[in-house]
C-alpha cells in the first residue's frame, strides 16, 4: 500500500481551511470536509495515479490534483520507487493559475 506524506505548507493550509470551515459554517461542515480528505487519501493509497494530471504544472514529476470542498485542489505526485504520494499544496481554484505554477517549485 502507498504511503501518504504531506509537506508542511500543505498540512498547514488544510488545517487553516478546516478551522475556517468550523468557525464560519459549523462543526458538521468541517467534519464533512475532513471526511472528504480521508476519502481522497484512501483512494490515493489504493490507486496513486488515479487523479487527473495537473496541466498547469510541468516539472520532473507528474503532478496530479484531487478536488475537495468544491473549490480547492489537493496537488500531489507519486514516487513509484518509494511507493509514496507527496501532497505538496492545497490550491484555491479561484486564484490566478499562474500562482499555482509559482507555488510549486
Image: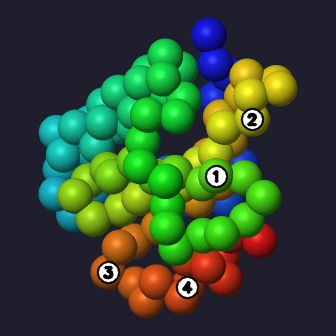
Residue 14 seen in the current view: no
Residue at mark 4: 99
Tell me which numbered mark, 1 or 3, is placed earlier along the sequence: 1
Question: In the rendered view of the protein, which quadrant contains the N terminus?
Answer: top right
Q: Residue 90, percent across and down? A: 50, 60
Tell me which numbered mark, 1 or 4, is placed earlier along the sequence: 1
Question: In the rendered view of the protein, which quadrant contains the C terminus?
Answer: bottom right
- Which of the two marks, 1 or 3, is nearer to us in this view? 1
Identify which residue, 59 or 89, lies in the foreground. 59
- At mark 1, the secondary structure is loop
- Which of the two marks, 2 or 4, is nearer to us in this view? 2
Q: Residue at x 73, y 22 (%)?
A: 83
Residue 94: numbered disc: 3
Residue at mark 2: 79
Q: Are marks 4 and 3 in contact (CB under 8 Å)?
A: no
Location of residue 41 with respect to 89 vertically, above or below: above
Identify which residue, 54 or 84, lies in the foreground. 54
Q: CA distance from mark 2 to mark 1?
A: 9 Å
Residue at mark 1: 62
- At mark 3, the secondary structure is loop
Q: Residue at x 33, y 52 (%)?
A: 67
Q: CA distance from mark 2 to mark 4?
A: 24 Å
Tell me which numbered mark, 2 or 1, is placed earlier along the sequence: 1
Amino acid at each position: 500500500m502507498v504511503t501518504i506524506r504531506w509537506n508542511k505548507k500543505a498540512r498547514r493550509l488544510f488545517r487553516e481551511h478546516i478551522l475556517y470551515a468550523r468557525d464560519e459554517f459549523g462543526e458538521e461542515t468541517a467534519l464533512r470536509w475532513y471526511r472528504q480528505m480521508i476519502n481522497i487519501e484512501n483512494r490515493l493509497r489504493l490507486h496513486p495515479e488515479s487523479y487527473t494530471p495537473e496541466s498547469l504544472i510541468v516539472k520532473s514529476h507528474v503532478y496530479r490534483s484531487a478536488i475537495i470542498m468544491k473549490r480547492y485542489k489537493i496537488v500531489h505526485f507519486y514516487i513509484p520507487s518509494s511507493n509514496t504520494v507527496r501532497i505538496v499544496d492545497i490550491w484555491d481554484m479561484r486564484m490566478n493559475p499562474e500562482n499555482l505554477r509559482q507555488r510549486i517549485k
